[in-house]
Image (cartoon, rainbow, N blue to C red):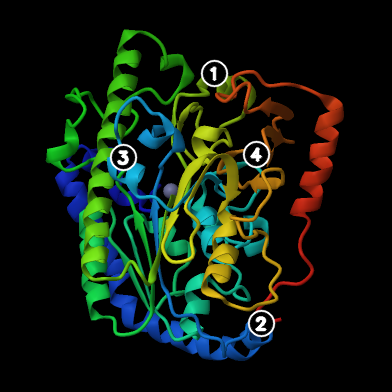
Amino acid sequence: MTIIGSITDTAIKKNMKVYKIARRVYDKVKFGKDSAKDRAYFEKRLKKMRRSAEKFLDLSNKPDKNVILITVDCLRDDHLSYNGYSRQTTPFLDEIGGYRASLIPASPWTYPAVASLLTGFYPHNHGAVLDGEDRKFDLSKLRPLKSNILTLSEILALFGYATYFNSGIDLAMLSVRRRFHEQKLNSLTDAEVILNDLKAWIRKQKGNFFAHIHLKDPHEPTMPPKEFYNYFGEVKKLPKIEYWGDFQKPENQKGREFEEFKENKVLLYDNTLRYVDYALEQFYAFLEDQGLMDNTILIITADHGEEFWDHAELEAKYFYDIRGYAGIGHGHSVFNELIQIPLIMTGPGVPKKEEKDKFVSGVDIVPTLFDLLGIQHNIFFDGTNMFNASKKRLILSENTVHGHEKKALIYGELKFIYSGGDKVAWLFNLKKDPQEQNPIVDEELSKIFIRNLEKLTSPKLLYWGVQ
Ligand SMILES: [Zn+2]
């Protein structure tokens, strides 16, 4: 998703080269010139927060492992080859080892999901959401991350870590703006550009560090480098294949042309995943060359997945969307193509374990890392240590961006999708119906899930940080 209406008009999108250059100039003008100011703001805030943070954290007990968090935008779990996907999209990730599970992001779109990964709180608690009842992705309704909540980067900075963030997507950066020593936006940039910048930054570090990078590649406009563009087969040069062609609306989603477009769109996405896997493999080799993997926890995950018309019919029939779209992109629904993403963690202390049938949550990342790093605290996170978490616990995903609010609650193999505005209260058994094609209406069970939703989303009385 993009925030710059003026330069994303159709005329400029037609020429991807011009579009890319325009975006880079915009990033520099809009964010680059403020980098010194942003850093000063960050350091001043850190100073101010230290005293209140001391009430919740034992700052005398300093952790000594580096942390690298890599989020890949729009990365759906079922397209990774280790999950049995038909194309070998991720040979490197298939072999990396460590801990592996499926992660439910706290939201099906970038802005709130990234904030949850970095705070351990659900969107209704951390505050970085799109507000309003009847939503149409109106960016004036974006609310900032609450200032009394510290991010993982700020906490580690309080322990003396150097912190770095580099994003290929503006909304990921905006979600946690001024929460790192160094923060960069590189819109529409290939994974290797961002990873090379990170390598250069790592080479300069003398002490412990935390780096978070957010890779754009699978996100529209999908434009992998030419060596990978046709990796699993030649992608036909169909109009607007980097986007959604003219197949956003249900009335156009039929016929031979649509089927051909869909096939090529998915092929382009898979070719892009193969590229991202290659770029990550190169980066991992660098970490090993530098001797960093003995002392670094590496996390590879996503912010949310991507829909390729998986639920177009159900969405068109039951869910209001002011754009008249169905079945494409992300942010609009809470089906699993959007809220089931990979989680791979490796490094010292990380169990070597693959938990294929276990869901963990985006809000588990921070509490899990705290345990791995030996950070003593008394913060009531929404998440928990994912390695010890039960398979049966409630996991939430919320804050959709088009139409009425939709929420998902997962409990083991049971999934509940709720939208008061759309009058939808559906249950799915993910074991029997993993594609979520047959919603079950069960009033009694729905009542229990609604009660749990209300309980889980009622505001917490006490946040941590500055009160
Ligand atoms: Zn995203």
The residue to which callout 4 is attached is: 406
Q: Name the side, left or right, on which 444 lies relative to 414.
A: right
Contact (CB < 8 A) between labels 1 and 3? no
Spot occupied by residue 370 in the image (x, y as percentages of width and height): 56, 70
Q: Are marks 1 and 2 in contact (CB under 8 Å)?
A: no
Label 1 and label 2: CA atoms lie apart by: 47 Å
Give the structural element (helix, strand or loop) at label 3: loop
| Residue 80 seen in the figure | no
Front residue (pair 325, 363): 363
The amino acid pointed to by label 4 is: Lys
The residue singled out by tag 1 in the image is 313
Whether disc 1's CB lies below 8 Å from ligand 1 is answered no
The residue pinned by badge 2 equals: 466
Tag 3 and tag 2, C-beta contact below 8 Å: no
Amino acid on which disc 2 is placed: Val
Q: Earlier in the sequence, mark 1 or mark 2?
A: 1
Is ligand 1 less than 8 Å from the beta carbon at label 2?
Answer: no
Instruction: Please state which of the two labelled residues, at mark 1 or mark 3, is closer to the viewer.
Output: 3
Question: How far apart, in angstroms, are the residues tagged by discs 1 and 3?
Answer: 30 Å
Residue 302 image offset from top left, x and y in percent: 44, 49
Residue 427 position within the rendered picture, expressed as x and y whole percent measured from the top left: 71, 28
- What is the quadrant of residue 383 in the picture? bottom right
Report, in whole angstroms, how far the alpha carbon at label 1 lies from the one at label 4. Answer: 17 Å
Sequence order check: which comes first, mark 3 or mark 4? 3
Residue ID for mark 3 = 90
